Image: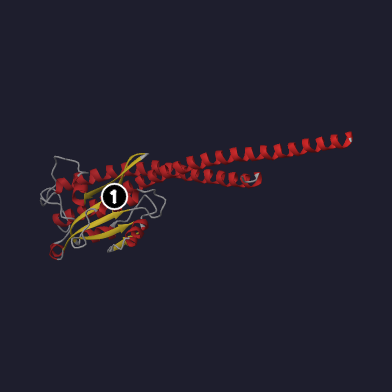
C-alpha cells in the first residue's frame, strides 16, 4: 500500500483532473447554446433567400451556379465532403463519420475534400488520399465557404458527410446530396419575379446563378455548424464521462488515503503499547 503522502499527491492530481474536465464540460455546454442560436438564424435567412430564388426560377434544375463553360469541363466523379473536428477532443464521432463514408467510397468514382484537421489525419493514417483539406472555421459566424463551393462546381455531383446534433447525449453521422440539402431547406412562395416586372443585371440567368452560389454557401455553412454542434455535444459527453470517472477515482484514492492514515496511527499505537509493556516488564524485574 502507498504511503499517505503519496496518496495525498495522487488525490490532488485527480482533483485537478476533475476541475479541468469540468471546465471543458462547461465550455462545451456554452458553445452548444451559442451554435444552436446561430443555426436557427442561418436557417431563417436561407428560407428568405430561397423564397426569392423560387420566384425567380429561370430553369427547372438547381445548377449550382455553373455557367455553360463550367458544364463542359465537369469532372465526371461524385465529390465527397467530410466535415470533422479540428482537434481530437470530439469523442468518437469523427471515427464513426469516416467509417460511414468509407462504406460508400470508391476511389475510381469519388474524390474527397476534408474539412477539419482530425479527419485529414484519420484518412492519412488509413492511406486514403484526399484532394483538398480546409481547416474547420474557428468562429461560428461569417464562415467563408467560397473555396469549397468553387470545388463543388467542378464536379458532377456532391455528397456531404456531416454530424447531426440530436440531443445533448446523442449525436448521429449523416450524409446528404448537396442539391437535396439545398432543396430540403426550401420555403414555398406563390409570387413570381420576372423580367417583366424587374430589371436584372446582366440578366436573370446570372442573378439566378448568383443566388444558387449563395445558397450553396449558406447550406455548407449550416452543415458545418451542425457538425460543430454535434462535436461540442460529443465533447460535452466525453468530458462529462471523464469528470465522473475522475471523481470516482478521486473518492477511491481518498478512501485509500484515510485507510493508510489509520494504518499509520494503528502502527504507532501498537508501538506505544508494546513500549509500555516492555517498560512494565522491566520495572517488575
| Mark 1: few/some/many CA within 10 Å (<14, 14-19, 20+) | many
Q: Secondary structure under badge 1?
A: strand
Q: Nearer the viewer, residue 281 or 80?
A: 281
Would residue 69 be found to the left or right of residue 120 on screen?
left
Structure colour scheme: secondary structure
* Number of numbered discs on residues: 1
Would residue 255 be found to the left or right of residue 150 on screen?
right
The structure residue drawn at horizontal position 32% and vertical position 44%, both measured from the top left corner, is 39
Q: Quadrant for the N terminus, please.
A: top right
**Residue 195 at x, y = what percent?**
11, 51
The structure residue drawn at horizontal position 15% and vertical position 52%, both measured from the top left corner, is 62
**Residue 171 at x, y = what percent?**
33, 42
**Residue 212 at x, y = what percent?**
20, 53
Q: Which quarter of the picture shows residue 131?
A: bottom left
Q: Which quarter of the picture shows residue 260?
A: top right
Depicted 77 relative to depicted 46: above or below: below
Would residue 170 be found to the left or right of residue 263 on screen?
left
Q: Quadrant for the C terminus, please.
A: top right
Q: Nearer the viewer, residue 16 or 216?
A: 16
Q: Which residue is mark 1?
A: 162
Q: Nearer the viewer, residue 143 or 200?
A: 143
Q: Nearer the viewer, residue 142 or 231?
A: 231
**Residue 190 at x, y = what percent?**
13, 39
Amino acid at each position: 500500500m502507498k504511503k499517505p503522502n503519496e496518496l495525498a499527491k495522487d488525490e490532488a492530481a485527480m482533483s485537478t483532473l476533475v476541475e479541468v474536465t469540468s471546465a471543458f464540460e462547461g465550455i462545451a455546454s456554452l458553445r452548444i447554446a451559442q451554435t444552436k442560436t446561430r443555426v436557427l438564424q442561418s436557417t431563417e435567412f436561407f428560407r428568405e433567400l430561397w423564397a426569392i430564388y423560387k420566384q425567380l426560377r429561370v430553369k427547372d434544375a438547381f445548377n449550382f451556379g455553373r455557367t455553360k463553360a463550367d458544364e463542359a469541363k465537369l469532372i465526371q466523379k461524385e465529390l465527397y465532403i467530410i466535415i470533422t473536428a479540428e482537434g481530437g477532443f470530439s469523442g468518437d464521432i469523427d471515427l464513426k463519420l469516416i467509417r460511414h463514408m468509407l462504406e460508400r467510397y470508391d476511389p475510381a468514382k469519388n474524390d474527397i475534400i476534408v474539412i477539419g484537421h482530425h479527419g485529414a489525419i484519420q484518412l492519412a493514417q488509413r492511406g486514403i488520399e484526399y484532394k483538398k483539406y480546409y481547416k474547420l472555421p474557428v468562429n461560428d459566424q461569417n464562415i467563408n465557404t467560397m473555396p469549397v463551393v468553387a470545388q463543388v462546381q467542378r464536379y458532377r455531383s456532391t455528397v456531404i458527410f456531416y454530424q447531426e446534433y440530436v440531443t445533448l447525449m446523442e449525436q448521429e453521422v449523416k450524409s446528404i446530396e448537396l442539391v437535396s440539402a439545398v432543396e430540403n431547406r426550401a420555403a414555398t412562395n406563390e409570387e413570381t419575379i420576372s423580367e417583366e416586372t424587374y430589371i436584372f443585371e446582366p440578366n436573370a440567368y446570372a442573378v439566378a446563378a448568383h443566388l444558387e452560389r449563395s445558397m450553396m454557401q449558406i447550406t455548407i455553412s449550416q452543415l458545418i455548424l451542425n457538425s460543430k454542434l454535434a462535436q461540442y455535444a460529443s465533447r460535452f459527453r466525453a468530458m462529462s464521462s471523464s469528470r465522473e470517472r475522475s471523481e470516482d477515482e478521486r473518492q477511491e484514492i481518498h478512501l485509500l488515503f484515510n485507510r493508510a492514515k489509520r494504518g499509520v496511527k494503528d502502527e504507532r499505537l501498537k508501538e506505544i503499547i508494546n513500549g509500555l509493556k516492555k517498560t512494565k516488564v522491566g520495572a517488575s524485574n
